């Protein structure tokens, strides 16, 4: 496990006049790079050749480091080059997906904007629940065993895999038959079964709230909101129920994009309050708590109850809907503020006020 002091020692050797903001070329990299450029930073993209076109076309990258696969970020030479460029890494969804917690915690000797210690809470569903419960959030009920299922549940598997293999069941019997079906179709492995989470299915609409916790300003800001556009589940409504039954569909939840959202204003008191509480508990479980962006993933019912089913303690790709400006960022900052830029601005303020070591881990 890399100690905080080791990161501080790296930062001490940095030329703070020439800091670069770096990330893996995927997920929300355009958002991060644009924000960095607007705050006058240089940018470094750790990129694969197949994704190069994205960063060439938008011209937001000063320095490319090409790798065969994203996990090569852990290579010694790549890390050395990043440190030479005085790079501060901004982690996003691909860090968890392609590198994994162990690598990030133990082998990544480059300063990161974010709290590595929180990763352990973020990637474990049980620990996530404990965190969110302590913050007093409303969570979907979970079931210990398939035999206890007495109403509609969503069956989830570990890891961010786009809801692949998830299915719905409403009794022990439907659970068992769906399992066989999913295994038969190759969506699921027998070994997955010991890690399932059975969650009460909440009927409502999804809403993802993007917050920014500023250590420097000591505040939690609501900067944006979105819903995901998921294939195939968002396409099901276009097929009449009769036909759905005939072809025996099973919904999957692979994200293909995001759609901006603004909420009824009467729901905002709770949205703002749960953001504050989640950040406050994060300080207790992994000091100094969340650094920068985080997202609460919720379902809102027809009675206005907000159920949180997940937290991401980093920038989410949903914040890409706000590149330029989202209504909520506009309310606080006026035009031109969004998650990538807010991150860069925090780093800039950290440098200016001599507080960089409080926000890099
Ligand atoms: P990609 O860069 O598309 O390979 O995505 C990297 C990781 O981030 C994968 O685990 C994706 O499932 C996740 N991801 C990418 N885009 C989104 C999005 N718009 N919403 C949620 N997750 C995403
Ligand atoms: P997750 O992998 O936890 O992000 O869930 C993937 C998708 O499943 C979400 O985007 C929702 O559309 C849906 N979902 C997750 N949990 C629930 C729940 N408890 N009730 C209803 N839908 C859910």
Image: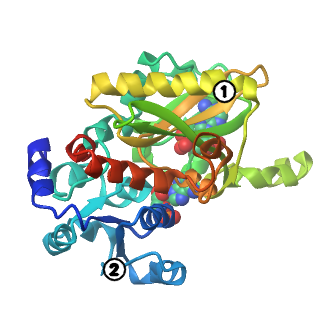
Q: Is 338 left or right of 352, judged from the image as shown?
A: right
- At 33% from the left and 34% from the top, the residue drawn is 121
Query: Does the closest atom of ligand 1 sit within 8 Å of the Cβ of label 2?
Result: no
Residue identified by numbered label 1: 268
Which of the labelled discs sits on residue 331, or is there none?
Answer: none
CB-based contact (under 8 Å), mark 2 and mark 1: no
Give the answer, above or below, for where 245 lies relative to 214.
below
Q: Quadrant of the N terminus?
A: top left
Indicate the secondary structure of the residue bearing disc 1.
helix
Name which quarter of the figure residue 44 lies in: bottom left
Name which quarter of the figure residue 132 lies in: top left
Q: Is 78 left or right of 290, judged from the image as shown?
A: left
Quadrant location of ligand 2?
top right
Give the answer, above or below, for where 24 lies relative to 173.
below
Indicate the secondary structure of the residue bearing disc 2.
strand
Give the answer, above or below, for where 349 lies relative to 21.
above
- At 46% from the left and 21% from the top, the residue drawn is 277
Residue 186 visible in rendering: no
Residue 315, position in %: x, y? 46, 49
- At 28% from the left and 50% from the top, the residue drawn is 352
- Badge 2: few (under 14), some or many (20 or more) residues near its Cα, within 10 Å? some
Q: Is 145 left or right of 269, judged from the image as shown?
A: left
Tally of numbered tags: 2
93 and 266: which one is in front?
266
Residue 318 visible in rendering: yes
Residue identified by numbered label 2: 64
Residue 25, position in %: x, y? 42, 70
Give the answer, above or below, for where 190 lies relative to 15.
above
């Amino acid at each position: 496990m890399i100690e905080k002091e080791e990161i501080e020692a790296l930062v001490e050797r940095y030329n703070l006049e020439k800091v670069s903001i770096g990330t893996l070329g995927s997920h929300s990299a355009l958002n991060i790079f644009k924000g960095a450029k607007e705050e006058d930073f240089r940018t470094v993209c750790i990129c694969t050749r197949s994704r190069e076109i994205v960063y060439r076309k938008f011209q937001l990258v000063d320095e490319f480091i090409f790798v065969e696969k994203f996990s090569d970020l852990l290579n010694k030479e790549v890390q050395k080059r990043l440190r030479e460029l005085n790079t501060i890494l901004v982690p996003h969804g691909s860090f968890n997906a392609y590198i994994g917690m162990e690598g990030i915690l133990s082998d990544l000797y480059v300063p990161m904007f974010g709290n590595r210690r929180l990763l352990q809470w973020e990637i474990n569903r049980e620990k996530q629940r404990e965190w969110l419960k302590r913050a007093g959030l409303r969570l979907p009920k979970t079931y210990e065993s398939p035999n206890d299922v007495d109403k509609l549940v969503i069956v989830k598997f570990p890891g961010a895999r786009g809801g692949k293999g998830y299915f719905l069941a409403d009794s022990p019997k439907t659970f068992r038959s769906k399992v066989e079906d999913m295994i038969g179709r190759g969506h699921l492995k027998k070994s997955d079964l010991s890690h399932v989470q059975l969650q009460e299915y909440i009927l409502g609409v999804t809403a993802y709230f993007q917050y920014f916790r500023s250590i420097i300003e000591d505040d939690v800001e609501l900067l944006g909101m979105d819903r995901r556009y998921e294939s195939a589940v968002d396409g099901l409504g276009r097929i009449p129920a009769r036909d759905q039954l005939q072809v025996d569909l099973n919904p999957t939840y692979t994200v293909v994009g995001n759609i901006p959202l603004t909420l009824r204003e009467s729901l905002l008191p709770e949205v703002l309050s749960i953001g504050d509480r989640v950040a406050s508990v994060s300080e207790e479980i992994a000091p100094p708590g969340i650094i920068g962006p985080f997202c609460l993933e919720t379902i809102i019912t027809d009675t206005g109850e907000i159920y949180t089913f997940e937290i991401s303690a980093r920038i989410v790709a949903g914040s890409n809907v706000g590149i330029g400006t989202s209504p909520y960022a506009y309310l606080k900052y006026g035009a031109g503020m969004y998650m990538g830029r807010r991150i860069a601005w925090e780093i800039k303020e950290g440098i200016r006020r001599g507080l960089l070591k409080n926000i890099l881990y």
